[in-house]
Amino acid sequence: MTASIIQPGEIQPAGVEAPFIRLPEQAIFSRRSERFKFLAQGHAMADYLKFMAHIAAAQQQALAAMPQPSLPDAGQLSLCRQHGMPPLTAQSWPRERDWQVALRQIVGEVQPDARQATRSAIERLASADSNWLEAQAGHLLASRYDQLDLAAAPFIGAALQVYWVAMATALGLSAFGRTDNPTLCPVCASAPVASVVRIGGEEQGLRYLHCSLCEAEWHMVRVKCSSCESTKGIAYFAVEGSSGAVKAETCDECHSYLKVMYMERDHLVDPVADDLATLALDILLDEKGYMRSGPNLLLIPSADSPT
Ligand SMILES: [Zn+2]
Ligand SMILES: [Zn+2]
């Protein structure tokens, strides 16, 4: 779906329209893996970021190996369009067990690299029955963090991302449109992990929210709270001495924040990888009393416990 979303003050050639939704490219996880490796260089959390690079590479392999998933039919898609609902709603979509196959592939791949605490979580996942895994996935997608096996959750998140990317890309852009809640993903109704101010062509200078689950992006005007849609009381924070490529957009109406990444400052920013490489910013915002509005499924639930 395309829509005319030119903002005042943005220069755009006549007749060219930016897409409202951008679906993930097929190589999304391998690009993310490279980004994690790059960000690990000289980073205080280099070992952690290198391990995340391995997880992302394993996600790409699992995506390539995933069979064609079941998808909503034409009737369901049209019903969703009529009612402004996302067709692949995370909390109600009947998951196939293929995501569990992806999970076992991912943990099998990264296990040799894992530290002891993570290795124990991997062993729990490897021996868990399918119903327990489904229950954990349900808790994660509904943000019931108190019921999660926290050390295992990032792997479950990684596998669910693979499954949702497979579904979203198999359906294609024409299946999706605007939905009733502009703060949630129009593909799967999840909250965004971060937003990206893009460069190039008709997307120059436009801000897209990046889905924490299916990796789709959807347009939202800049300087607007991505949680409560307020345009008042928006401010930006960065860690002192940083490149300015990643900032936190805070809202004084709902006291939440989400990171914004500027491709103009670094055209390779990745919403998931750069988020995990800038946890110092989350600590700063936590100290200022702001709550993060969207999750990073690879780090649940708080920013202070990577293992
Ligand atoms: Zn989504
Ligand atoms: Zn707000």
Image (cartoon, rainbow, N blue to C red):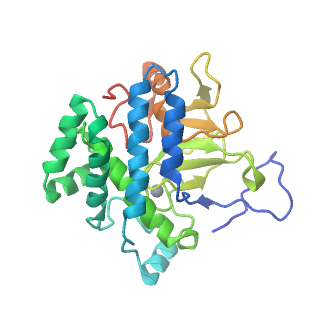
* Residue with the most extreme top position: 240
Residue 21: name its quadrant. Answer: bottom right
**Going 69% across and 64% down the picture, which residue do you hit?**
3
Please give the count of numbered marks on the rendered protein.
0
14 left or right of 71 in image = right
User: Does 74 appear above or below 185?
Assistant: below
Q: Where is residue 265 in the image (x, y as percent from the top left)?
A: 69, 33
| Furthest residue toward right | 14
Q: Nearer the viewer, residue 40 or 241?
A: 40
Looking at the image, which residue is at 44% across and 25% down?
Answer: 46
Along the line of sight, the residue nearer the viewer: 148 or 263: 263
7 sits to left or right of 178: right
Image location of residue 123, percent across then percent down:
17, 42
From this viewpoint, is residue 228 visible? no
> Quarter-wise, where is residue 153 in the image?
top left
* Quarter of the image where the C terminus is located: top left
Q: Position of residue 86 (x, y in %)?
A: 46, 65
Kindly identify the residue that appears in the image at 48 percent across and 29 percent down.
277
Location of residue 182 in the rendering, given as x and y in whole percent from the top left corner: 54, 55
Q: Is residue 267 above or below residue 283?
A: below
Quadrant assignment for the N terminus: bottom right
Q: Nearer the viewer, residue 219 or 179?
A: 219
Residue 231 seen by the camera? yes
Residue at (54% x, 33% y) in the render: 38
39 left or right, relative to 141:
right
